[in-house]
Image (cartoon, coloured by chain):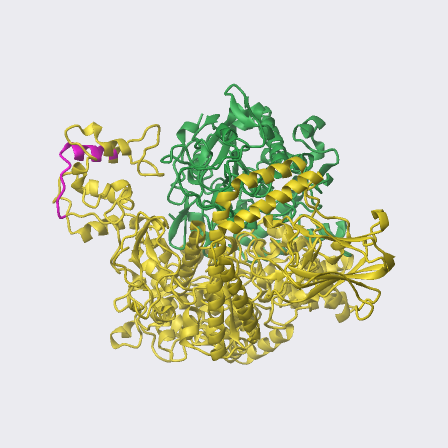
Amino acid sequence: MKNHSALPILLLLLTCGVSHAEGGSFEAEVASIFQRRCLSCHNDDEPKGDLSLSLPSTLAESGFVDSDDVDSSYLLELITPNDGKAEMPKDAEPLSSHEIEVVREWIASGAEWTEARRLEPPVVTDRDWWSLQPIVSPSTKENEQSRPPRGEEHPVDWFIDAKLAEKGIRPVGQADPITLIRRLTLDLTGLPPSPAEVDAFVRAFRDDAEVAWSTAVDRLLHSTAFGEKWAQHWLDAARYAETHGYDKDKPRNNAWPYRDYVIRSFNSDKPYSRFVQEQVAGDILFPGDPDGILGLGFLAAGPWDFIGHWEVGESKLDGRIAKHLDRDEMVSAVFNVFMSTTVQCAQCHHHKFDPIRMEDYYRLHAVFAAVDRADRVYRGLPPEQQQRRDSVLANINRLKREQESLTTQINRKVAAKTSGIDRQIAKLKETYGTGLSPEPQYGYHSEISKVRDETKWVQLDLGKPRMAEEVRIIPAYDQFNNIGAGFGFPTRYRVQVSNDAEFQSNVRLLFDGTKNDQPNPKSGTVLVSGDGKTFRFLRVTATKLGERRNDYIFALGEIEVTSEGGAENFARGAQVTAKDSIELGVRWGRTNLVDGIYFRELSDPSALTELRELEAKRAAIEKAVRPPGIDERLDEIHQELDRLNQELDGFPAGSLVYAAATHFPRGGRFTATEGKPRPIHLLHRGDLRSPGDWMTPGAPPLWDEAPAEFAALRTEASGNRFLAEQPLASSSNPQEDSRPTFDWDEGEARAELARYLTRPDNPLVWRSIVNRLWLWTFGAPLVGTPNDFGRGGVKPTHPELLDYLAATLRDDPDGSLKSIIRLLVTSQAYRRSSEIDPHLSKLDSENAWLWRANRRRLTAEEFRDSLLASAGVLNREGGGKSFQDFVIEKPEHSPHYEYHLHDPADAKTHRRSIYRFVVRSQPQPLLTTLDCADPSISVPRRDESTTALQALAAWNSRLVEFAASELGKRMEDESNSPDHQVYFACRLVLSRPATPLEQAILREHLDRHGPRSLARVLFNMNAFLYVD
Amino acid sequence: MIARRQFLRAFSGSFAGLALTDLMAKDGILSGQHHHPPRAKRVVQLFMAGAASHVDTFDHKPLLNEKDGQPWDPGEEVELFQSTPGACFASPWSFQPYGESGKMLSEIVAPLGDVVDQLAFVHNMVGKTGVHSQGTLLQTTGFNFPGFPSAGSWISYALGSESDNLPSFVVLPDHRGLASNGAKNWSTAFLPAEHQGTIIRPTRDEPIADLYPPESEFITKASDEAGLAALKKLNLDHARKRSGDDRLAARVRSYELAAAMQLSATDALDVSSEPQSIQNMYGLAPEGPAVDDSTINEKAESEFFGRKCLVARRLLERGVRFVQVWSGNDNGFPRRNWDSHGDVKRDHAPLALGMARGASALIKDLSQRGMLDDTIILWTTEFGRMPCSQGSKGRDHNPFVFTNWLCGGGFKGGIYGESDHWGYKPLDRGRQTQVYDIHATILHLLGIDHTKLSVRNNGIDRRLTDVHGRVIHEMIA
C-alpha cells in the first residue's frame, strides 16, 4: 500500500497537464507544496483570510510575497515556525525546512507562475483499479478461459485448485465426518449439532458421503436457525443496536422488527437486490409491503445523538452539527456495507485514493437530506389513513413550531426588560432563602393529558372523620430543569369533603374555583377554611389542568389538614388515591403529597410579600411587552393542537419499527421534515461554518454508466422553499440572490440510489456481498478488507473466483444468497481438515490459498447459545421483543444497564443471543470480552483475541456457572454410570465422545468433584471453544 | 500503513502473528522501537465528567467580579446550549496566589496550591460543540462521534504493558454511574481487544468482572483448583494434537495469567496496606467507601476521588500503562457531576475540593517515589462553563474555551495559552489549543510521533490526532 501514497500527487500533475519542466525551476515543487498543505483552505472557492492559492501568480499583487525583499514576505512569515509552531498551516505541523526553502527560493526568483496552471485540490479521477472494472462474466465467450468447465469439477474448487497448483501447494485431506458436521452446523446455524444429528450424519456419510453432505447442507439452510445465525453477520455490518448511544443512551423499543426482518429475509432467501433496495428506499419502491418499511431499519440502525437532536435542535449550530454527523453516519453505512466503498473519506477533501470527489459525498448527503431516525408504522395502518395521519402530524408540527417561535420571541423581549427585577428577586432568595434546597419528594403528579379540560382528582383518606380548621394546598416545586414553583397547579379546581370514599353522598364543597381561571400561587399556599363539620375524605378535583410544555397535568406538592389551632396535621401519612398518578422514583408519588416534605421558599414573611410584589411587577411587565393578539393566537394554537391530538389518537396505532422516517410527531426540538429536503451544502473541510455550493442528490460515478444525478429540482411554483435552516455563515452564501428552489422528491432520490446500488453493471455491490458470504463460510474473506474495496484496501486473493461468484449471483433471476452459500460449502475446499502442515505453513502461513480449513473460535453468541443448548435450557422461541439480560436502573434520565444484577437463571433470557437487547454505552460484558461486535461502527469482521480476561469470563462468569449446573443435573438424570455421564456430556458439548486421555481426566474430576464441576471444565475446553 | 501485527491478526486462520504476550498486551507495536527516546512511560487521565468550570477553579477572571450582575456583552452573538445568556457571574469563591509563580487558584482547588509550580496550564482549550457526549468523546478519543479508540487504547497499542499480570489500560469509573457515552470512552473500536480499558471498581466485592468464581453450590476451592488443573491437561493435549496453532497454547497460558491477575489485582487494590499518613494525604474517610453521600459533600467526594487516585498510583507502580480516573457520573438525579446548570456552588465546591485533594496527593506521592518524572498526569473535562449565569446560580456549557493541565513526565510548569478576560474564548483567537495538540504532545513525550502511529480502518489511516495536532514544544521541560 505504501506505493499508493504518492499517487494523488502524481495523478494531479497528469490532470493538470503540465510537466515538470514547463514551469519555472521550482514551480512543480511549489505547486505540490501548495496543493498538499495550503489549498484546501485557500482556493478560489474558499479563500480563507482573503488568500487564494488557486493561481499563485496573484500572490505578488495581493502583497503576500515580495520578491525584492524576500525575507519580509508575509507568506514566509506565516509559514516559518517559531519555537516549533507556525501560523500556517493552521493547527498542523509546520512545513519542513526544505519546503520552506523551496518557497523562499521561488519567491526570490520572482515568484513566477505559468498563467495556465491553475491549482486544484488533489483529486483522483481514474478508475484503474480492480474493483471498479466490470465484473468478468463467465457466461461471455471471450472469458471461456476463466470459466470452470461445466459439470466436471466443482467451480469453486476449479478456481482454488488452479491457484494451489500455480503455487505448488498440495492441499491437506478432508476432515472426518464428525468434525465436518460440527463445522457445517455451527457455520450455518450458530448452534452445535445434537448428538442424534451427528449420529444420523455419520451413518449417512458412510453410505454416501456426497449425498450425506448435500442433504445436511439443505437441511441446515432450510432451518430457521440459519437466518438467526446469518442475521448476526448482517447486523454486525449494519451497526445494529437497541439504544441510541451517546449521552443518556435511551432504549429504542421498536428496533427489533428490523432484526426480525433480517432473519426472515435470510430464511426466505430474499433476492439480494430486493434486500438492498428495501434497506435504502423500500417505502418508495414497494409501497404497501411491510418489508419495504422494515428494511429502512438499516438506515436508522446506527447511533443517534439524542441530546443534539432533541434538546439542542437545528436552530443552533450544535444541533446542525449533530444532524450532519448523523447523515454522515447513514451515508457511510450505505456505502461501506453495500458497496465496500469508503465514501466518508471525501468529507473534508476529495478522497485521497479513490475517484470520489467532495461533491459526490455531499450529493449523497442530499439523498438523505429529508430523513431522520424515528419510529414509523410498518403494518396496521392503511395507506389512505397513513396519509391522513401524516398530514395531521404535519399540522401539529407546524403549530408547535409557531408556538415555540412566538414563545421564544416573547421570552427574549421579557428578559431584556426584567433583568433588574430578576436580579432583585435573586437577591431576596439568596438572603431569605430557607437554605433548604427542594427535596426530591416533590408530591403528586397525575398522568399527562394531551387536552387541557380533562378532569382529574386526588383524594385523602384521613382514617377517621376529623374536624379541620384549615386545608392548606401547597403547589409542587420542581427543581428539575428550573421549572420551579407552581408546577402543574390546576387552572380550575374545586375542594370537596365527604364521609363517602366514592364522593357519591354527603359531598360538601369547601372551595370552588371551577368557574374561572385561578392564579397560580407559585410558592404560596392556598388556604381553604374548614366548614366546622367533620369529614374523613378530602378530594381536590382539577377541571382545567396545569400546563406543562405542550401538554397538561395536575400536580400538587403537599396537602395539610390542620386541627384547631394548627397543632396537628391530620393529613400527614393519610392514604392517598387518585384518578391516575405517575409514580416515578423518589420525585413523584401519591404518598409524597402527605409526607410533610415540600419546598419552603423564603424564611421571612415580609420578604415573601416583597417577593410576591416583585413577581407581580414582573408579570405586569411581561403582560405589557406581549404583542397584542399574541395570547389569542397562542390560545387558538392550543385549541387547534388539542383537536389535532385527539384526531391523532383516533388512528390505529399500528406496528412500529425504528427506521428512517420523514413523518413523526415532534419531540423536544426534534422535528420531522415532512419530506422536504434540508438544504445541503458542500462543506469546506467538513465544517458547517464554511458552506460552499448547494448540493442536489447524486452518487459517485464509480463506473461508466453510473447515474450521477438522482432527482430533478422542483420548480418554484410546485416546490417548497427551505425549512427554517439557512446557510450557516452569513459571510458566505454563494447564491443568495439567484438561488433556485433546491427542493426535490426525497423518496425518488432514495429510490434512485437504491437502483444505482443494484444495477447489474455496478461492479462493487455484487463483489461486496459474495466476498462477505465467503468470509461467513470460510472464516476469512477473499478480499481482506470487506468494507473497503478501494485503493486503501487489500486486493483479492482470487479475483477470478470472486468475479465468478459475483456474476453468478448477479445473473441469478432469484438473486439467491443461499445458492451461493450452498456452492461454497459443497466445495472440497470447505471440507478440508484444519490440520496445519508445517511444510505448507512455511509456504503460506496465512492460508491465503486455502490448502486447509481455518480453525476458528466460537463467536461470542455461539459460545453463549452453545452453553444454553448443552445445558438443555435454550429457548428456541423466535422473533419479537428482545430479552434483556440486565436490570435497568434510573430509567427516567440516563438508564443504567446493570448486567451484574441480572439473574442468569431467568428463563426469559435463555433465548438465542440474536434476540438479545443490544446496548451501546454499556455493552454486555461476557460477549464483549469474547469479541462481539461494537455496534457503534460497522464491523465487517470480528476480532478473535485471546486474553486473560476471557479466561476469567469463561471460568467465572455466572452464566457459565448456571449452565454448568444445569448440564450437571442433565448428566445425573441421564445415567448413574459415571462413564456414561462423561460420554453424554462430551457429546453435548464437544459433539463427540472423549478421547481415552480426556476420558481418564474427566472421569477423575467427575468422581471427586461431581458432574456440575465437570460441566464447568467442559465449557472451558479448547475442544469446545474451537471449531476444527 | 497497516501495522504488521494488525494485518496478520486480521486473518483468523493465521497464527504467526500471535505471540503469547498478546494476552496481556505485553508488547506494543512500538515496543523497543520508539520513534524517539521517550521522556515518560505512563499516563493518568483525570476526567471531570459534566464539564468543570474553568473560571471557578484554575482560570481566574477578576473582570467577572467587577461586572458581577451587570449585563454580559462580549460583543458578539452568543449561542448557548440550554439557555439565553444571563448577567456576568462572579465566581462564588475567592482566588489566591500560590507557589513561586504566584498562579491564582480558587479556594476550591487550594490543595493543588502545594504543587502548582509543577502544573502546565492550558487555558485556551477549545472544543467542537457544547454537547456532553460529543465533547467527552472528543477528549477521550479525539473524535466527537463514536467508533474510535480511546487515547488509552492507542497508547496501550503502541507501548504495551509493563505488567505481566495486570491490564495495560485501566479505567476507574465514578462508582455512581458511567459518564456520557459509557464504555465508548475507553473502547478499542478497531484496535485489538486487549487494548480495551478494563474497568476496575475498587470498592466492589468483585473489582474486575469475573475476577473470582461466583457464589455457587458446587464451586469450592478444591473443585476450582482441580478443575483448572484438569483443564490445563485437556487443553495441552488438544493443542499438542494440533501443532502449529499458537492460539491453542495461548489459551492455556491465558488461564495462568488469569490466576496471576487474581493475585496481583487483589494486591494492587488493597489500599489498607498503605500507611495512615498516605491514606490521610489522599483524603480517605475513616468510614471508607460507605461514607455518607446523601447530600453532596466534600468529605465523601474526597474519599471517592482520593481512593481512585491512590489505587491509580498502586496500579502505575505495578506497570499499568494508562489509568483513566473519572469524577462524576451521567446526568442522573441527584446530580453527582460537574454539570452545574442549576447551582455551581453546591456541586463544584465538594467535587473540586475532593478532586484537588486527590490529585495533589497523587502528584506528591508519585514525586516522592521518583515516578513523577516519567508519569504524565492530564486533567481534563469535556468543555468549560460560561462566564455569565444561567438562572441565578448556574453556568451553561462553554465549548469555546476551557482549561486542561498537565504535570510530570517531562511537562514544565507554567501557563501555555490564555483565555480572554471573560473566560469566554481564547485570548488570541488565532491561537487556540485543541485536544489533538494535547494528545500529540503526550505521545511525543512517550516517544511516539503522533503522525506515525496509525492503523488503517475502513480505508483511512486513522490516528489519535486525526489529521491535526502539533506538539507543544514549549510545554516540555
The residue under the point 44% across, 32% down is B419
> Does the magenta segment cover residue B22?
no
| The image quarter in which residue B286 lies | top right
x, y percentage for residue A968? 74, 64
Direction from residue A334 to residue B303 in the image, left or right: right
Among the chains pictured, the one given green colouring is B
Question: On the image, which quarter does residue A493 sit in?
Answer: bottom right
Image check: B5 left or right of A914? Answer: left
Task: Give the total number of marks visible in the rendering.
Answer: 0
As drawn, is A1000 to the left or to the right of A634? right
Quadrant where the image shows the C terminus of chain B:
top left
Viewer-side residue, A515 vs B290: A515
Q: Closer to the camera, A872 or A624?
A: A624
Q: Is residue A418 visible?
A: yes
The correct choice, above or below, for A164 with respect to B230 in the image is below
- Picture coordinates of residue A930 (x, y %)? 57, 56
Image: B212 above or below B280: below
- Residue name at image x 60 percent, y 33 percent: B317
* Front position in the image: A284 or B267: A284
Q: In yellow, which chain? A: A
Q: Which residues are magenta?
A: A100-116
Is A106 contained in the magenta span? yes
A247 and A275: which is toward the camera: A247
The residue lying furthest to the top in this view is B100
Relative image position of residue A163 (x, y in whole percent): 36, 65
Residue B146 seen = no
Q: Position of residue B371 (x, y in %)?
A: 56, 28
